[in-house]
Image: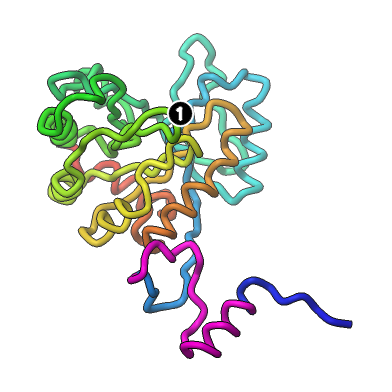
Amino acid sequence: MLRRQTSEEQLVAAGSALYYMPFMDPQRLMDAFSIPVSARRKLGVQSLYDNRTCSIPAGLYEECGDLLADAGIRTVVEVEPDESSPEWQWSLKGITLLSGAEVDILGNGSLDFDDALLAELDYAVASMHSGLTGPREKVTARTLKAMDNPYVVAIGHPTGRLIGQREAMDLDMGAVIEHAAQTGTALEINANPYRLDLRDIHCKMAVEKGVKLAIGTDAHSAAGLNLMSFGVATAARGWARRGDVLNTLSVAKLRAFLKAKRP
């Protein structure tokens, strides 16, 4: 009985026949020059970022814990607590929880949380939600100033795009990535399919400069946690390796990174 060839087998056959080239991971075929020099490296995701679990009813905490544990998740970062309910301090199946928040980058580049409050959190991601159509110099300056804050670990959905709805900001990504490298600030890959921000080409620019990436699901419910795969695929298209992505770190190494910028 004939067996149908897989897409990889078909590509290998075609490549061997025409160019004697090895199989190329389709995720990395971004342009004519994207020929990988090594085999595909899978990312071992252990941590989740940007999960707004304050919007998950208390009755779903255990469901989320089981889901994450089954997926091999060991750390959840940016749990925004509902202080009216002590149940936010839930701990299930050995999962480490770190407190954090997404803070807004204001018009002058300052944040809507003061440093005293940020110092009480384990993690803060700064994002821009207004003034996205401003001139290139202004939106870039706001982003750079936010990275100067010692409590900002990452910049969230850096270009602000919403696919099919809103264009990306006219951001100087070269300057943003350079400043991220200088300040030790990570850049988020927002895994929501409507964002995918950073996009693949910017991921590649970031890892080439030694900037860490943090894949965030932007989850507002248990179902949203399944979006991680879109972020992983984007990182792969940007040629990110295991060491380039914060989500792959052990709890101890993650804690060390989160404290590195702090005074």
The residue at the point 42 percent across, 39 percent down is 190
Magenta segment range?
A: 10-33
In depth, the one of 195 and 154 nearer the eye is 195
Task: Quickly name the residue at label 1.
Answer: 79
Residue most extreme to the front: 18
**Which corner quadrant holds the N terminus?**
bottom right
Where in the figure is residue 96, as x and y percent of width and height? 49, 40
The residue at the point 23 percent across, 58 percent down is 210
Q: Does 5 appear above or below 151?
A: below
Q: Does 70 appear above or below 241?
A: above
Determine the secondary structure under disc 1: strand
In depth, the one of 122 and 233 nearer the eye is 233
Total number of numbered labels?
1
Where in the figure is residue 225, as x and y percent of width and height? 57, 37
Residue most extreme to the right: 1
Q: Quadrant of residue 204?
A: bottom left
Q: Does 241 appear above or below 70?
A: below
**Which corner quadrant holds the C terminus?**
top left
Q: Quadrant of residue 171?
A: top left
In depth, the one of 54 and 205 nearer the eye is 205
Q: Is 109 covered by the magenta stretch?
A: no
Where in the figure is residue 138, as x and y percent of width and height? 12, 28
Residue type for callout 1: Val
Where in the figure is residue 111, as x and y percent of width and height? 21, 21
* Label 1 crowd (10 A; few <14 / some 14-19 / many >=20): many
The residue at the point 32 percent across, 54 percent down is 201
